Amino acid sequence: MLGTALTREVSMSLMLTAARRVTALGLCAAAIVAGPFAAFPASAAAAGAELFITVTPRDGGAYSMRLTCAPDGGFHPRPREACDALRSVDGWVGDLDVDPGPCPRIYDPVEVEVTGHWYGRREPYYEEFANRCEMERKLGPVV
């Protein structure tokens, strides 16, 4: 092609090829930039809930659990009971009050942290309880 005149068809073909490459490059760049901002796919709400629960007693022996609801499961000792309790408060962990009642007045603090999503909604939860009894009375099968 060097030294020869370009016909109109050849020059149009070259311009379309360049335009396609620029468009493809733009789409790739948009996908890279948008990737971190797409926290949940459109099907996340249909996927149910996925919560990570960490219980940390002050004297050590922390443990973590993964709870999924719809379907109920994960690495949790009582997923069905925990999911039922959470469904009763629409996933608002802080609204749980499973078994209000007396606990010994012993100060042996326990921290609970819950992260993850409930049907597409993120609602992190953190609370420090005076002792394990208070934690279990409020959160029940979730912990």
Image (cartoon, grey):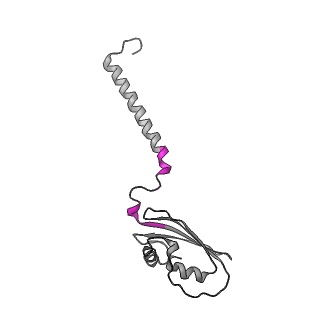
Seen from the viewer's position, the closer of residues 114 and 64 is 114
Residue 26, image x and y in percent?
A: 44, 37
Farthest-out residue, left:
9
Residue 90, image x and y in percent?
A: 43, 71
Q: Quadrant of the N terminus?
A: top left
The total of numbered circles placed on residues is 0
Residue 113 colored in magenta in the image:
no
Above or below — where is 42 with respect to 66?
above
Q: Quadrant of residue 134?
A: bottom right
Above or below — where is 68 with respect to 19?
below
Q: Is residue 106 left or right of residue 43?
A: right
Q: Which residues are magenta?
A: 32-50
Q: Residue at x 60, y 81 (%)?
A: 132
Q: Quadrant of residue 13?
A: top left
Q: Quadrant of the C terminus?
A: bottom right
Q: Quadrant of residue 113?
A: bottom right
Q: Residue at x 36, y 27 (%)?
A: 16
Residue 14, image x and y in percent?
A: 37, 24
Q: Residue at x 47, y 46 (%)?
A: 34
Q: Is residue 15 left or right of residue 60?
A: left
Above or below — where is 13 with respect to 100?
above
Residue 36 colored in magenta in the image:
yes
Residue 53, image x and y in percent?
A: 54, 70
Q: Residue at x 65, y 77 (%)?
A: 109
